[in-house]
Image (tube, rainbow, N blue to C red):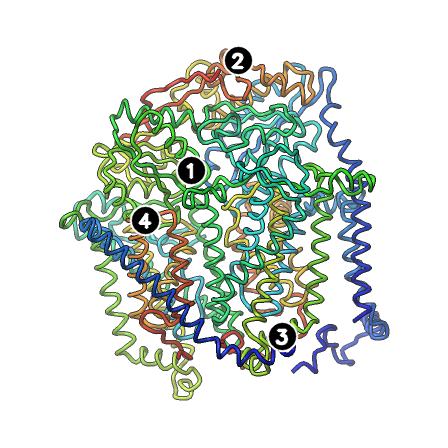
């Protein structure tokens, strides 16, 4: 089933389709064949561009296009990076293992509340400090942000296993509903969590404000000449951005390694045909649980750093809409293809945060008079919904599909049991 | 396989390098940003900027649009000048259409924008206390003065019932207060409401309901404490789910509790009309079992949403005076407002008062951010738009005012009485 | 790793009964605890228990009507029609327009089609029972028609071309339509709650001990029960119903037997849409307010009801709806209303984990 698709390079079109106009494409293909490492050129350039964005996007001559024109300022940049991370995490669950998770926001929330528990003044009757960047007299549990980050990953992974263990045996669409249920329950528990048998565990709907910030402490900061800041500031966003980018690189790295690992092949097998995979000796539950837990870890990372960046977490922030928007990112980009997911997440989160507003402004400016002005942000959900429907109707494999996924969708009939097998 | 690993490691290394480079750039930038406010100090004729930060989309939009207009009118009347300074104004939105309410990421981004724009010396806002809790610490680091027309959360300015541990100091990392508000906080409202229910309405046992949202829960908790303090029996306290279809089952529990009064803390937009409707249907009308709603229920739209028969006899409280009950400068201002923009809402005059306070502070300052903050706390306006205005060291108005209203069978809410509490 | 994997299938079969038994013990314990708690409350305050039960049944009837739409569609093409709840919401808005403006309106089009009947405020002002009844009939008719057209249009446009795709594809499409319909509601009526005047006379028909039974409670039952009877008749006794059941059992085989599968599926969607419209009309008249985001939550609750009763099973949907209404009412009446969402979704998860076939057993094409 896998001979015709290599898993890496997209299948090449037949020779007779190479027109003179796309001569360069043919030579590029030849170049790629001869130099296998060249497929890293694009990712490499992309990473370099992403890291250097604050210099060429926020400042300098191009800033008028990117910062002002497209509206990608430092805040939006950070949010885009967070959502790319979320999308990469969800990609493991949906893209690789084929488990439709409609409650991914639960892990985002759990990651943020992990920071609330171990890196804020929430438990003000305790005073625990461990390598943190706060004044030592500050009440509450304050572990080093980096420790909290790892804790967030661990707690989310455990939660993923606890949620997944009884539910992952369900068939695909039931699983989707159950995950959706958890996505609703977890924020609701946080919302009511200010009085669980008399204990205030989450500060309820008022949320937790003033979170700990990442930082490297005075010693490291001095030793590196201030390159690694002692404590991240609330105005200067570059350290935040680079931290997320670094986390994102780790996520990409793990994604790539997982995809090509034994586990990754097991996921694909489970996704394509559970029964066959099971018959071939793939342990279904364990394979699915791993996918679920690993996806959860990245959601937790993103939640912790987002909570710290916003400097407050509110149970009302973690709505079903976020789950769906992250799902849209994965689908638009191309399920199972990391580069597609990154592109999709960047595009959709840009649209979500500022792009639609900007497009609305362009339209309104383009049409003279103010009487016909539309408030495009009002149509945001409709636009995202339409995006989902159109993608499903015309290009279910995504903008930049993974070759294998494309083949699966092209197969059409006969895949009806794809998400249907019961373990 | 090995080559790919090598490349990945290389990519990570490059990333780390870029991170370091960024760290350098970052720290440089930080120093210039931090002193930005100081550079604007100087002589007259300078231009400074004030901004408003309100949720302009969703359910609050009806209020906030009039507030933006009111601020514009105040500036017009002052000729866009405060003392020697030319004042520019820009309106910012802290809501997203998707949420239909304030959004924490937008609040944070807005606050950073104000700090980074060196000409901004003051912020009128926010509308929602939750948003203020995000913005104030950021603005505090940039020493930007804040004058809120509508925040009522206790912990933003002082400790007390309803405030959380660590509040309010945790919002002011620089150690200097930069936040004031022109309305009284929830603990005041809760005290007045509890006293009014016990003494004037004659309730002996009260059931407390909140809308499970930040404001409603806050004022309901403060009310529970205030009721306990004055010996008013609390029969129970629960929250309603804004997405539920009706609340009849919930109301049977209240009926069974034997309470002869119900306090509702929350915002009518969270299905509050249905709560009132089901209360009357199950527990009894508002003569038999008294009903008092907090600020957020004193809305004319509630007459439609709950039905005029059901709302008849309900009490409401608010830390503000209704537009019709303002006198003196307030009346003059609202007359001008009506002539230009039409009918005002409850918070319209309070936005104007916030703007007035801020312009007054700017006119007495040297134009630097720090000095505007200092002068803001020295405010002493005798004939302000919503009455005399001066602040204590916490940034609360020295005289806190809470009005009680009662609904009839048709809008508007009828003003019953106002209580003033000293806040010195 | 390799050895563990090859050994695991055998291990799994050995372990399964133990974990299954544990799950059942856990499930039974929950059920017993709930039963004890209910009986205690019933003994402590019988009057209130009765009142809460009545409320639960009435609210549950609305869940049941919406749940029927989910279960019909799921039974025939195994699709969780996410857009169904939002279709229901548009039904409440349509009724709202009819009562408030006396006119039928296609959303997002400014023109309204004034219906030449005394409606809305006119009906409230007049005391004529006939006029009230006529208004209700009009609301029901137009809302049902409206939602029916939407449902069939969505099916024709989107679900039909995707019928042979992996299940994930139409499911995501349904989520997309749910968002679109919600946005239509938002743009149509705005973000706030949309009230409409009471059409029904106030007051109670009868009061027995503490339990009141009002006219609007009667309306819910008086509409739901006949609809159920008609629906059962349609599915059990008519040719179209027979075609539906055949298609549900085996689409290919029924196509070979000369059944027009496309038309049968569209007919199912039409039925589901009509039920959503009826539920929307009742909801708007009974509750009196609706909101653009109502459909998402209520739709999920209704889907939970369908699963609870056994998806694909018509009687199951009704039973599930009523049971869910009761669970909600007992929780709000005797426990803490704050936890309703958690409890209902908790029930959904428990049912899916312990008994995916629901109370009465599911009836789906590949059902076991």
Residue C335: image tag = 4
Circle 1: element type:
helix
* Chain designation of label 1: B
Q: Position of residue C157 (x, y in %)?
A: 49, 68
Q: Residue A266 carries which label?
A: 3
Q: Quick one: label 3, few (<14), some, or many (20+) residues within 10 Å?
A: many
Q: Which residue is drawn at 62% across and 63% down?
A: A91
Rounded to the nearest angstrom, the CA distance separating label 2 from label 1 is 33 Å
Query: Would residue A307 be seen by someone viewing this image from the given angle?
Result: yes
Q: Do the residues labelled 4 and 3 touch (CB within 8 Å)?
A: no
Mark 4–mark 2 Cα distance, whole angstroms, equals: 52 Å
Q: Is residue A77 above or below residue B230?
A: below
Q: Where is residue B398 in the image (x, y as percent from the top left)?
A: 49, 16
**Coordinates of residue B163 in the picture (x, y in percent):** 48, 31
Q: How far apart are marks 4 and 3 (CA)?
A: 46 Å
Residue B420 lies left or right of residue A250; in this view the side is left
Distance of label 3 from label 1 (alpha carbons) = 49 Å
Task: Name the foreground residue: C89 vs A370.
Answer: C89
């Amino acid at each position: 089933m896998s001979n015709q698709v290599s898993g890496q390079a997209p299948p090449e079109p037949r020779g007779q389709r190479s027109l003179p106009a796309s001569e360069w494409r043919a030579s590029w293909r030849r170049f790629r064949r001869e130099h296998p490492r060249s497929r890293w050129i694009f990712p490499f350039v992309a990473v370099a561009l992403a890291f250097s964005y604050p210099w060429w996007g926020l400042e300098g001559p191009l800033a008028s296009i990117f910062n002002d024109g497209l509206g990608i300022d430092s805040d939006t940049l950070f949010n885009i990076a967070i959502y790319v991370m979320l999308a990469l995490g969800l990609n493991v669950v949906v893209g690789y293992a084929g488990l439709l998770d409609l409650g991914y926001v639960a892990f985002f929330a759990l990651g943020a509340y992990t920071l609330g528990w171990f890196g804020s003044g929430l438990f003000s009757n305790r005073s625990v400090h461990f390598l943190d960047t706060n004044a030592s007299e500050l009440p509450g549990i304050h572990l080093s942000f980096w420790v909290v980050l790892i804790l967030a990953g661990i707690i989310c992974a455990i939660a993923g296993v606890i949620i997944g263990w009884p539910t992952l045996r369900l068939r695909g669409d039931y699983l989707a509903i159950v995950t959706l249920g958890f996505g609703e329950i977890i924020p609701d528990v946080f919302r009511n969590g200010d009085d669980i048998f008399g204990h205030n565990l989450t500060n309820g709907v008022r949320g937790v404000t003033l979170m700990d910030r990442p930082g490297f402490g005075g010693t490291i900061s001095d030793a590196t000449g201030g390159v690694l800041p002692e404590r991240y500031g609330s105005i200067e966003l570059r350290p935040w951005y680079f931290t997320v980018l670094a986390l994102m690189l780790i996520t990409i790295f793990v994604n790539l390694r997982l995809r090509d690992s034994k586990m990754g092949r097991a996921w694909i097998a489970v996704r394509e045909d559970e029964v066959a995979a099971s018959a071939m000796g793939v342990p279904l539950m364990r394979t699915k649980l791993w996918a679920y837990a690993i996806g959860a870890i990245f959601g937790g990372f993103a939640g912790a750093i987002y909570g710290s960046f916003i400097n407050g977490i509110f149970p009302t922030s973690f709505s079903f809409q976020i789950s769906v928007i992250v799902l849209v990112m994965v689908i638009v980009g191309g399920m199972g293809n990391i580069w597609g997911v990154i592109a999709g997440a960047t595009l959709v989160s840009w649209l979500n945060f500022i792009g639609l507003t900007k497009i609305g402004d362009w339209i309104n400016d383009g049409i003279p008079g103010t009487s016909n002005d539309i408030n495009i942000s009002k149509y945001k959900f409709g636009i995202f919904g339409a995006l989902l429907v159109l993608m499903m109707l015309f290009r279910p494999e995504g903008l930049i599909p993974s070759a294998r996924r494309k083949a699966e969708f092209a197969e059409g009939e006969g895949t009806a049991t794809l998400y249907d097998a019961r373990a | 396989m090995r080559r790919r690993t090598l490349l990945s490691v290389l990519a990570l290394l490059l990333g780390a390098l870029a991170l370091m480079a960024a760290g350098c750039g970052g720290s440089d930038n930080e120093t210039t940003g931090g002193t930005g406010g100081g550079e604007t100090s100087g002589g007259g004729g300078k231009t400074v900027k004030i901004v408003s930060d309100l949720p302009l989309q969703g359910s609050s939009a009806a209020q906030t649009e009039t507030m933006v207009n009111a601020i514009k009118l105040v500036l017009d009347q002052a000729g866009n000048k405060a003392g020697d300074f030319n004042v520019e104004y820009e309106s910012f939105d802290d809501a997203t259409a998707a949420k239909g309410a304030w959004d924490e990421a937008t609040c944070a981004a807005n606050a950073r924008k104000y700090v980074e724009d060196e000409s901004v010396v003051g912020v009128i806002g926010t509308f929602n206390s939750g948003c203020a809790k995000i913005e104030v610490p950021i603005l505090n680091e940039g020493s930007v003065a804040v004058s809120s027309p509508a925040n009522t959360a206790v912990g933003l300015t002082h400790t007390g019932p309803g405030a959380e541990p660590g509040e309010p100091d945790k919002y002011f990392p620089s150690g200097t207060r930069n936040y004031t508000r022109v309305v009284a906080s929830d603990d005041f409202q809760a005290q007045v409401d509890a006293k009014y229910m016990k003494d004037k309405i004659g309730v002996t046992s009260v059931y407390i309901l909140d809308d499970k949202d930040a404001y409603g829960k806050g004022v309901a908790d403060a009310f529970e404490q205030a009721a306990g303090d004055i010996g008013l029996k609390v029969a129970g306290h629960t929250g309603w789910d804004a997405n539920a279809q009706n609340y009849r089952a919930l109301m049977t529990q209240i009926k069974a509790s034997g309470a002869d009064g119900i306090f509702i803390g929350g915002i009518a937009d969270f299905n509050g009309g249905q709560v009132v409707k089901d209360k009357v249907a199950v527990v009894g009308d508002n003569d038999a079992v008294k009903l008092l709603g907090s600020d957020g229920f004193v809305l004319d739209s509630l007459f439609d949403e709950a039905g005029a028969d059901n709302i008849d006899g309900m009490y409401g409280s608010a830390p503000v005076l209704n537009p019709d009950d303002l006198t003196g400068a307030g009346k003059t201002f609202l007359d001008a407002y009506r002539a230009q923009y039409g009918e005002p809402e409850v918070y319209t005059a309070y936005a104007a008062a916030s703007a007035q306070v801020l312009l007054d502070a700017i006119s007495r300052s040297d134009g630097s951010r720090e000095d505007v903050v200092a002068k803001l706390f020295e405010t002493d306006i005798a004939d302000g738009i919503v009455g005399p205005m001066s602040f204590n060291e916490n940034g609360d108005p020295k005289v806190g005012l809470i009005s009680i209203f009662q609904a009839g069978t048709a809008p508007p809410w009828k003003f019953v009485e106002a209580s003033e509490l000293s806040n010195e | 790793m390799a050895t563990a994997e090859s050994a695991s299938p055998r291990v799994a079969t050995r372990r399964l009964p133990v974990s299954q038994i544990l799950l059942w013990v856990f499930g039974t314990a929950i059920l017993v605890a709930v039963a004890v708690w209910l009986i205690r409350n019933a003994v402590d305050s019988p009057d209130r228990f009765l009142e809460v039960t009545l409320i639960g049944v009435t609210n549950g009837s609305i869940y049941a009507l919406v749940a029927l739409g989910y279960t019909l569609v799921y039974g025939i093409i195994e699709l969780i029609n996410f857009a169904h709840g939002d279709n229901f919401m548009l039904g409440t808005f349509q009724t709202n327009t009819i009562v408030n403006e006396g006119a039928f309106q296609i959303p997002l089009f400014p023109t309204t089609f004034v219906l030449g009947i005394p409606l809305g405020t006119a009906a409230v002002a007049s005391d004529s029972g006939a006029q009230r009844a006529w208004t209700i009939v009009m609301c029901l008719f137009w809302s049902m028609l409206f939602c029916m057209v939407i449902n069939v249009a969505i099916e024709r446009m989107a679900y039909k071309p995707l019928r042979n795709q992996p299940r994930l594809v139409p499911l995501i499409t349904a989520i997309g339509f749910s968002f679109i319909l919600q946005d239509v509601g938002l743009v149509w009526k705005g973000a706030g709650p949309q009230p409409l005047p009471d059409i029904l006379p106030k007051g109670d028909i009868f009061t027995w001990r503490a339990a009141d039974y009002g006219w609007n409670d009667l309306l819910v039952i008086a509409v739901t029960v006949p609809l159920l009877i008609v629906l059962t008749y349609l599915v059990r006794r008519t040719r179209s119903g027979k075609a539906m059941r055949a298609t549900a059992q085996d689409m290919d085989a029924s196509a070979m037997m000369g059944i027009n599968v496309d038309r049968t599926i569209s007919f199912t969607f039409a039925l589901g849409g009509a039920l959503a419209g009826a539920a929307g009309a009742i909801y708007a008249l009974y509750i009196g307010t609706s909101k653009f985001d109502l459909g998402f939550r209520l739709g999920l609750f209704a889907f939970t009801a369908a699963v609870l009763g056994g998806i694909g099973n018509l009687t199951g949907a009704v039973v599930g709806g009523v049971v869910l209404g009761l669970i909600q009412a007992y929780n709000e009446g005797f426990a803490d209303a704050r936890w309703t969402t958690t409890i209902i979704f908790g029930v959904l998860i428990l049912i899916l984990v312990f008994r995916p076939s629901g109370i009465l057993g599911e009836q789906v094409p590949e059902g076991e």
